[in-house]
Amino acid sequence: MKIPSAQKKSVDSNPMLVANQVNDKLVYSKTKRLLDIIGSTLGLLILLPLFLILGILIKIEDPKGTVFFKQVRIGKDGSEFYMYKFRSMVTDAEEKLAELLRLNEVSGAMFKMKDDPRVTKIGKFIRKTSIDELPQLWNVLKGDMSLVGPRPPLLREVNEYTNYQMQRLLVTPGCTGIWQASSRSSVGFEEMVEMDLYYIRNRSLFLDLKIILKTIRVFLGSKNAF
C-alpha cells in the first residue's frame, strides 16, 4: 500500500536530494540482503528462549494485553508495512498519546518522552536495553526492513516531512542505524535526519557491519535510550 498522493510529498523535485548518490550496486544489494536473511534467521533462533521469557513477563504484568505490538510504519518509497515490537506500554497507549504530545522531548516530526507514563515496568527495562526491538528481526526476514538503515517513521511523521527529510525513504528502513548505535534518543530530529542521509550516501557492507557491532553495545544498556 502506498501513501495517498494527497499526503505524500515529492521525493523527486528537490535539487538537494541524494537519490543519485545512493549505493544500489548489485553486489552490495545482494550481499546486504543475504546478511539480513542470515542475521535475522540466526537471531530469531538464538533468541527464542528470551522471547518466551519476555512473553510470560509481559502477560503477567498485563494479562489482558498482547505480547507483541504492531504498528503501521512507512518504508522505502513510501510503502506501508506492519512493524513488530514487544509491547512495552499499556494497552491504550495510542489513545493517550494526544494528551502527551505537548510534553515531547525531541524536536521535529517525532515523539519521545523519557518518563512516559504509558510505559509498563517490564517495558522500561526492555526499552532501556532495546530488547523491545528484537521482534523486528521478523520484519527483516520478510524484507520489510534491513538490519541497518533509517528507522521507519509513522505516517503522521511523514506528513510533516519536508522534501529534504523525505530522502530518508529512499532506502529500506533498518532495525538500527548510525544515530541508534551512537547517540540514541539524545539527538534531535534534524540531527537524526543528517545522520540517516550520511548513511544513505555512504552505505557499504563495511559501514553496515560497523553499525551492527556498535549496536550490540546498546543492548548492554544505553543511558540515552527511552
Image: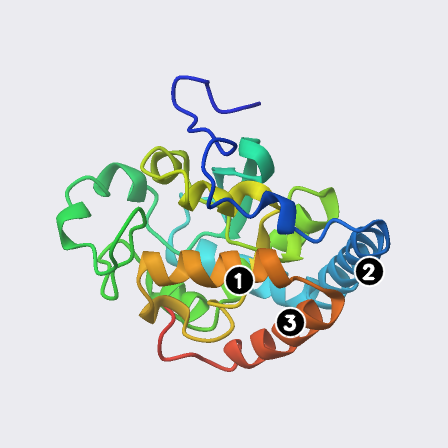
For disc 1, the neighbor class at 10 Å (few under 14, some 14 to 19, many from 20) is few
Label 3: which residue?
Answer: 212
The spot of residue 219 in percent (x, y) is 53, 76
Q: Tell me where residue 159 sits by quadrant.
A: top left
Above or below: residue 158 compared with residue 132: above
Give the Cα separation between the discs numbered 1 and 3.
16 Å
Q: Which image quadrant: the C terminus?
A: bottom left
SS for callout 2: helix
Give the Cα separation between the discs numbered 1 and 2.
26 Å
What's the amino acid at mark 2? Ile
Residue 93 in view here:
yes
For disc 2, the neighbor class at 10 Å (few under 14, some 14 to 19, many from 20) is few
Outermost residue toward the front?
15
In front: label 1 or label 3: 1
Above or below: residue 63 compared with residue 112: above
Q: Earlier in the sequence, mark 1 or mark 2?
A: 2
